Image (cartoon, rainbow, N blue to C red):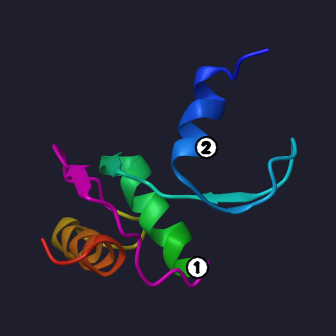
Amino acid sequence: MGRNLVQQIIEARWVAGKPIAGSEVAIRIDQTLTQDATGMMAYLQLEAMGVPHVKTRLPVSQVNQDMSAPGMRGGQSKERRRDLCERSFGAL
């Protein structure tokens, strides 16, 4: 039986791990897209996991609102997002 689309994509970008259902694998990521609220949470989670950089050919962060993090004023939150994004995905 042939491989499905997900299997083909994972196989083409395979880095490490075992192809067993439920097992962790490492794959090469071509591009990332984040937005206001979910992007901030993604950057914070990467920082909490100790991931210094996520290398992609095309990182995009769409920010169309001033979503403030709890305890931060709007400008502080914007600077924090920029700092986290630069450290996670490289200089803007």
For mark 1, give the secondary structure. helix
Nearer to me, 70 or 46: 46
Which residue is under mark 1? 48
Q: Quadrant of residue 17?
A: bottom right
The amino acid on which the numbered mark 1 sits, given as a three-letter code, is: Ala
Q: Which mark is residue 11?
A: 2
List the single residue furthest toward the front: 1
Mark before the other along the chain sequence, 2 or 1: 2
Crowding at label 2, few (<14), some or many (≥20) Cα neighbours within 10 Å? few
Q: Closer to us: mark 2 or mark 1?
A: 2
Nearest the viewer among 68 and 47 is: 47
Residue at 33 percent of width and 61 percent of height: 56
- Relative image position of residue 82 (x, y in whole percent): 21, 72
Which quarter of the figure is the N terminus placed in? Answer: top right
Q: Residue at x 71, y 57 (%)?
A: 25
Residue 30: percent from left, percent from top: 36, 51
Which segment is the magenta one?
49-68
